[in-house]
Image (cartoon, rainbow, N blue to C red):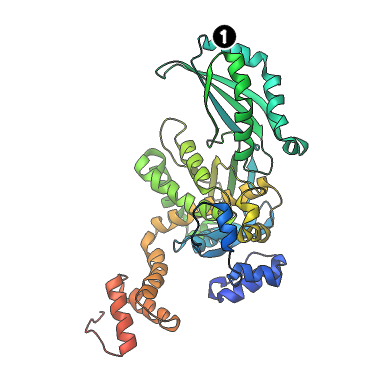
Amino acid sequence: MTNSRISGFYRYTPEERLDLVAQARGLTEEEKQIMSGEIPFPLRSANVMVENVIGTMAIPLGVATNFKINGKDRFIPMATEEPSVVAGAGNAARTSYALGGFYTSLSGSIMRGQIQVLDVADPYGAMARVYENKQSILDRCNAKDPTLVSLGGGAIDVEVHVMERSKEPMLVLHLLVDTRDAMGANAVNTMAEAVAPFIEEVTGGRVVLRIISNLADRRLVRARAVFSAEELGGPEVVANIVRAYEFAECDPYRATTHNKGIMNGITAVVLATGNDTRAVEAGAHAYAAVSGRYRSLTHWEVNREGNLVGTLELPMAVGIVGGATKSHPTARLALKIMDVQTAEDLAGCIASVGLAQNLAALRALATDGIQRGHMALHARNLAMMAGATDEQIEVVVKQAIQEKDVRYDRILALTKQLQTGVGDGNQSG
């Protein structure tokens, strides 16, 4: 099975879902046990990854279906604790599937390393001297990572900026490094630190900061899809979605929540694949404000056929080699389930999920409101908190939804009523 369109996937048990995905992506029995948690993440591995380890924390890992990306069906692993995110992404993807799904592109795999130089007597003269020595700078950088260079990457250019609005003028060099299939933080930071003494010689100044920038504006991913107006609910729903987007485009208070919805999907895939969620989130929000005003990361419009067209553009510094993407067994399996072969491929999948997630939220807002679907799923968490057994959860949730009263105190009362057989006198009309 290679088709990601699975009708009623949510009705399967977790074990049945895992079996379907394992069959489609060729997971071994051991890999299935890792995914299900039967083989836990080793404490010794956690102790290597971070400091002062005392344990691990499991996050639910769901799979979004219905994604066709650049003509290829994908299962998308998503690690999140928030209800409705996985279902929302898959449902939105379904409305684009018959119209071709998602199409993506990446501007490149170049990251910036910044080197701050203080106490420069002649900043513009120093800028000129840096450019005169550009090749020597690049050679020193690339000597620190011959493996990256052998793969076609490495330091490729230098930019120099004079910052005059600081207390005293400072020189800031940008090392432009093609990091290929790695996110690149370690490679870029190592190069910046290695070349710092030579920069001091050339400029006559004092180097202080040497660090990667997470505003990866030379590593932009773009996603596009056409969504069926009929499947979304008709022209009125489409029009409401576009107006909701326009609200986000002109108001930063709305844009913040609008973009948070995008990141619900993006962060879930970034986390599932062992990439740096904070770096991606910081870059996304900075890019949303790069014009000087915080705006929507997506654009929504209607084509000649009356269908909804969505596009998304944002920095996407993710990799498939190095870091937790290789050291965490679940992250490795998430990449296998997605069937990605390059960092560009991964970035396109992540952006597609972000676009789908945004549509799911806008559609909910433009129709029944965000709470209906969200609270129906959240009610299951509340029922579990109230002590309902697996068999009782669905009964409690169904009653709470029917009453339109999804509050913890009501779910607790329903749970106790079910377990004791004694009613509480609350009648629904």
Give the camera-side residue of 204 and 363: 204
Disc 1: CA contacts within 10 A as few (<14), some (14-19) or many (>=20): few
Give the camera-side residue of 168 and 377: 168
**Is any part of residue 404 visible from this angle?**
yes
Residue 234: x %, y % from top left: 47, 58
Inspect the image, locate mark 1, and give the three-letter code of the amino acid beneath it.
Gly
Could you say whether the residue bearing mark 1 is in a helix, strand or loop? helix
Q: Which residue is denoted by mark 1 in the rendering?
A: 125
User: Where the N terminus falls, by quadrant?
Assistant: bottom right
Residue at 39% from the left image edge and 59% from the top image edge: 367
Q: Residue furthest bottom?
A: 421
Give the camera-side residue of 26 and 33: 33
Q: Residue furthest right?
A: 150
Q: Is residue 301 above or below residue 63?
A: above
Left or right: 300 in relation to 335: left
Residue at 72% from the left image edge and 25% from the top image edge: 139
Residue 195: x %, y % from top left: 63, 25
Residue at 54% from the left image edge and 44% from the top image edge: 312
Residue 304: x %, y % from top left: 56, 46
Residue 345: x %, y % from top left: 67, 49
Q: Is residue 22 above or below residue 241?
A: below
Q: Is residue 297 above or below residue 411?
A: above
**Is any part of residue 227 visible from this angle?**
no
Left or right: 16 in relation to 81: right
Q: Residue furthest left?
A: 425
In the picture, residue 6 is in which quadrant? bottom right
User: Where the C terminus falls, by quadrant?
Assistant: bottom left
